[in-house]
Image: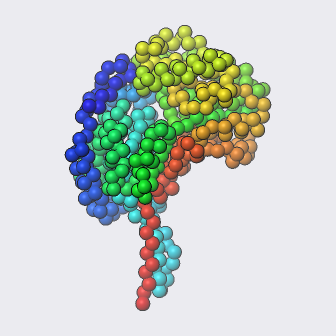
Amino acid sequence: MLKTISPIDNSIFVERPYATSTVIENTLHLSDQTKLKWKNTSLQERKKLVLKFVEVFLSNNKEIEEELCRQMGRPLSQCAGEMRGFEERALYMIDNADKALQKVVSKNDSEFDNFIKKDPLGTIFVIAPWNYPYNTSVNSIVPSLLAGNCVILKHSSQTPLCAEQLLKASEKAGLPKNVFQILHLDHSSTSKVIADSRIDHVLFTGSVSGGIEVKKAIGTRFIGAGLELGGKDPAYVRSDCNFDHAVENLVDGSYYNSGQSCCGIERIYVDEKIFDNFVDAFKAQTEKYILNNPMDNSTNLGPVVKLSAANNIRNQVSKALNNGAKNIIDVSKFKIDNSENCYVSPSALINVDHSMEFMMEETFGPTVGIMKVKNEDEAERLMNDSPYGLTASIWTSDKDFASHFGNRIHTGTFFMNRCDYLDPGLAWTGVKDTGMGVTLSVLGFDHLTRAKSYHLRRV
């Protein structure tokens, strides 16, 4: 049985049977039988059906938001933001599908009609995470369907109701049967599905170790995978920044969703000229947070996803403190935190360096390291000294400098004066152990299609 433990009170919130081998086989067979018909459905009809699917899903927002809060602990007051993100991304992809999927003409004259079509791959297996269960899955599901692929969705065991809500919306919207299906799977069955010859592409969001397992399961098969994995995203605060804006946004970027964001801020490098003032302001802003039951509307910092995650965060912070780091936050203001629950006090550590695991490995919790730097060269070196590269940000008033500096940073997305944000018109991608592939923007469709060339000559 799949059992979802709510981080709010460590009680069982959802129980579901894992899919049996018979159910898995039937799901794969039905997708395989359906994909040709869906491929041959016109793009305009696919767009109409996917738009209806999105509209039906969004109309059930109150139930979905409460379920989301109970499954993974995000404050209820913030859950509507995920729905807005889902809508923004879905509508962007629907509106830009024609442009992204249009044929590429090589030659068109009285003798030749030569062009490239973008054919769907077939069946896409989407493995979605719990931390942004709708915002991440929409990045994969909607463009896959628009491109003419069938989709099988496996959601995290922490958020199984998210998969069920999406399936319910697809059925109510009239999406053709078996074009979109879901499976509740354990790790072993997930690997078997990936290895099945009827899966044509895998889209996975999760840990680096999970990405390695996906690659192993694909084995010698010649299919692609999109892997969005870890992050340890840095920020450089320059002395010419808008100080109050930088502090406010970096505090939010560090603690939003209890720090459980792939592109959340985990490292901050501050110019030595403003370091002390920045630390004082960061402390004051952080200590305004209310860590409490996420169902309470006054709460803006909820529990982390599970007890093992909470204790891992505490252990990583504790190790850094034992090695000389200092927590600038007064943890006595957050009395609900204890080792028997998932409520982790926000922390911000100074006197840290890159010899510490805390500054090198993904923490995925409400904590951040803050280091003093002498100049931009030191900031560049430290920002690039990481196995990850999803996003990075600079806080400055000089746009020309920001553009120049961004060219030196090894990252998938570079921000100026903002962080922890996704623009659906930009490619979402990363470097190094952050993974491979692209979602969103018109480029995201290319990984869900294969080029097919037509060379038509009139004789």
In this rendering, would 290 be left or right of 56? right
Furthest toward the bottom, the residue is 459
At horizontal 73% and vertical 20% (from top left) the residue drawn is 276
Q: Residue at x 47, y 61 (%)?
A: 99
The quadrant of the picture occupied by the N terminus is: top left
> Which quadrant holds residue 263?
top right
Q: Position of residue 414 (x, y in %)?
A: 62, 43
Q: Residue at x 33, y 48 (%)?
A: 193
Task: Using the rendered view, name the quadrant where residue 264 is placed.
Answer: top right
Image location of residue 265, percent across then percent down: 58, 32
Residue at the spot 39% in from the left edge and 28% down from the top edge = 72
Is residue 304 placed above or below 58 in the rendered structure? above
Name the image quarter holding the C terminus.
bottom left
Does residue 455 lie above or below 312 as drawn? below
- Where does residue 334 sit, x and y in percent of width and height? 51, 13
Left-right relation of 305 to 29: right
- Of residues 229 and 299, the one nearer the viewer is 229
Q: Is residue 25 above or below residue 352?
A: below
219 relative to 429 in the view: left or right: left
Image mark count: 0
Identify whether 198 is placed above or below 262.
below
Q: Is residue 420 visible?
A: no
